[in-house]
Amino acid sequence: MRAGYSSQEILETIRMVQMEKLDIRTITMGISLRDCAGGDVHAVARRVYDKVVRKAERLVAVGDAIEGDYGVPIINQRISVTPIALVAESSGLDGYIEIARAMDRAAAEVGVNFIGGYSSLVEKGMTPGDRALIESIAVALAETERVCASVNVGSTRAGINMDAVALMGQVIRDAAQRTASRDGIAAAKLVVFCNAVEDNPFMAGAFHGIGEPDCVINVGVSGPGVVLRAVQAAPEADFGELASIIKRAAFKVTRMGELVGRSASERLGVGFGIVDLSLAPTPAEGDSVARILEAMGLERVGTHGSTAALAMLNDAVKKGGAMASSHVGGLSGAFIPVSEDIGMIEAAEAGVLTFDKLEAMTCVCSVGLDMIAVPGDTPAQTLAAIIADEAAIGMINRKTTAVRLIPAPGKSVGDSVEFGGLLGRAPVMALHRAASSVFVARGGRIPAPLQSFNN
């Protein structure tokens, strides 16, 4: 155990693991592929495969060793890479798909479950290479098992690229249709961002930003159970006291994350990046962000007061993490994915948690509309309009927002999709039926807001 961690902290960590479902959700190795660019696409794909395998060949073994040494479950080891549109600008659609296959083979070779970075940054406009990558996403995700994609369509500095937004509505629908036999799972591996961050270790939106070093270790910690137990133990606390209780819990979880991250960094001979303290839920009982909000006094998440409760939770988690480490980054806060949180699933099935309420809650959560199943016949223009709404929230509020929607092929409201594992299951949620097609068809760029003029 590294110096600076007291015996009391060690005992508290053991308790949190055994009783409160504390885990390290992911150790993610970020790898720069900028030196893989150039030459014909076959050479690029070969260099991508070789570098990923070379850098990450010991990642899983090191994660397993740390889990054994410290007794803290490490659920996933993953890889993020430089946005592929920057690496293979001139490849064309078929070339990009070849690179996606190389990424998939490399991920399988080193034993990770996901590799992120099949990505493009188009908040201000698209190059021909960006467009080709975006148009290849549906095929690439349908034909690979481990590759995850993301596209950044807006930012506070640049505004919202509505041409890219319209295109992403089509891509999401196509990705789902190409994996109709598996409930549209390809769409679950695709995130559309506004204000994307460069050091996010969580999938499906992870990529290795251009300001990052050649190789780095980022850690994603998840402790909804720890925070839930702390809130449940203080039923009479007012909100000021409750915020302090949550901060202390987040502090302890972040300390554990930094310990694991620095240990992985040392063993792999790679620099340590950040700890992402995100309350990332799973479908397991006791590992739910929704249950935390309900423990604050809500009968069911989604009812009136849910947005305020989530705002307080998100802020307290960030403050606790910032006190625990100088290297908190990524998205850090509270995630509200529907399919991955048993409390969210139940609230949606009961009709208490609606799509509009989820959108309101994204104004104060860590990310956005995450892992939400919608009717399979939803028009691409409606999907695009949802992306635009969420991007507007991020742009105006200077925060990261994201959309991960699954238009479930052949399914409608009242049905559900089943992905299994951490991706869980999701009830198909109702959307407004009035059309947004004329709005989306305007294209162009929604200008950056006044707050962008801040140098």
Image (cartoon, rainbow, N blue to C red):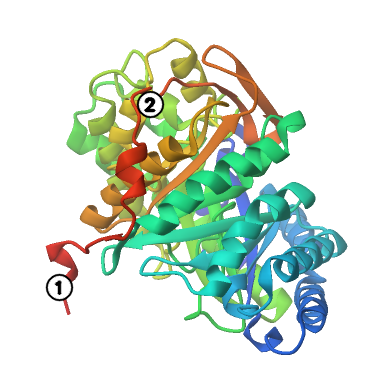
The first of marks 2 and 1 along the sequence is 2
Q: Is residue 166 left or right of residue 393?
A: right
- Residue 4 seen in the current view: no
| Residue 23 place in picture, x, y as percent | 61, 45
When asked about the image quadrant of residue 271, the answer is bottom right
**Residue farthest along the right direction in this orientation:** 109
Q: Quadrant of the C terminus?
A: bottom left
Residue 321 versus residue 201: which sits nearer the camera?
201
Q: Is residue 344 left or right of residue 63?
A: left
- Residue 303 seen in the current view: yes
Q: Which residue lies at the image location 27% right of the left edge and 48% below the top edge? A: 393
Report helix, strand or loop for mark 2.
helix
Q: Amino acid at mark 1?
A: Phe
When asked about the image quadrant of residue 213, the answer is bottom right
**Which residue lies under the disc numbered 2?**
355
- As displayed, is residue 357 above or below residue 300? below
When asked about the image quadrant of residue 93, the answer is bottom right
Residue 453, label in figure: 1
Q: Is residue 450 left or right of residue 439?
A: left
Residue 162, label in figure: none
Residue 127 versus residue 271: which sits nearer the camera?
127
| Residue 437 place in picture, x, y as percent | 37, 38
